[in-house]
Amino acid sequence: MTTHHPAGQIQTQGDRATLVFERRYPHPQGAVWDAITSPAQLAQWYMAKATIEPRVGGRVEMWTGPSQFHVQGRILRWDPPRVFEHEWHVEPRAELPQGERATIRWELSPVEGGTLLRLTHQSLTKGTALGFAPGTHVLLERLDAQLAGGKMPDWMQRYGEVASLYPAWQRPG
């Protein structure tokens, strides 16, 4: 399945950046909420092994994506089925030599025919944001496939196909 969506935005300020993506899904808000908060569904489209304590102050822990980043943090906002915001902390590793201390916010709004998702991943280092933008794009396509019950796009193949929509990332060192 090839889904065409507009590119997300990379907003930079100094050495920090924010990714912003908006997607409309032809599915009810509750279905989208379940897909972004259910460990069973996250395992499929987000390629994550996840633990989520569904409350403000609850713990979020994930091993996610092809690189299996270990993400940890606390839930900052839990307002089903509208807002899920949590810390996104990753310890230093080869791909992220300084680690990351970011926040990710999933906002859902009902719109005619479905749900509008606004994803904001803020306070990333600029290099991480540049590398993550195409990957986030593909993950949101995979979310679309999950919701539709369709075949998941291949993450690596689609990353290569959409990477030209975003500024180039330079691997450190």
Image (tube, grey):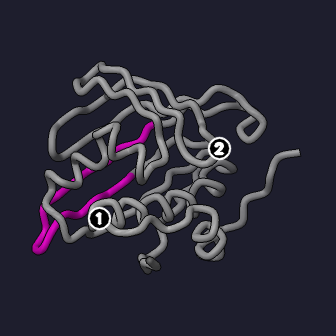
Q: Give the residue displayed 45% in from the left and 27% down from the top.
A: 61
Please identify the quadrant where the C terminus is shown.
top right
Please provide percent x and percent y for residue 74. Answer: 38, 23
Q: Quadrant of residue 78?
A: top left
Q: Nearer the viewer, residue 68 or 169?
A: 68
Please provide percent x and percent y for residue 113. Answer: 12, 74
Q: Is residue 122 above or below residue 165?
A: above
SS at badge 1: loop
Q: Quadrant of residue 108?
A: bottom left
In the picture of the structure, the residue carrying the numbered disc 1 is: 149
Q: Is residue 44 above or below residue 133?
A: above
Q: Is residue 171 above or below residue 123?
A: below
Q: Is residue 74 magenta?
A: no
Q: Give the residue displayed 17% in from the left and 58% down from the top.
A: 109
Q: CA distance from mark 1 to mark 2?
A: 25 Å
Of tags 1 and 2, which is closer to the observer? 1
**Disc 1 packing (10 Å; few <14; some 14–19; many ≥20):** few
Span shown in magenta: 103-119
Residue 5 circle label: none
Disc 2 marks a residue whose amino acid type is: Ser
Main SS of the magenta part reads strand
| Nearest to N terminus: mark 1 or mark 2 | 2
SS at badge 2: loop
Please provide percent x and percent y for residue 112. Answer: 10, 73
**Disc 2 packing (10 Å; few <14; some 14–19; many ≥20):** few
Q: Give the residue displayed 15% in from the left and 45% down from the top.
A: 81
Q: Is residue 59 left or right of residue 56?
A: right
Q: Give the residue displayed 59% in from the left and 54% down from the top.
A: 132
Q: Is residue 113 magenta?
A: yes
Q: Nearer the viewer, residue 42 or 56?
A: 42
Residue 67 circle label: 2
Q: Is residue 107 above or below residue 161?
A: above
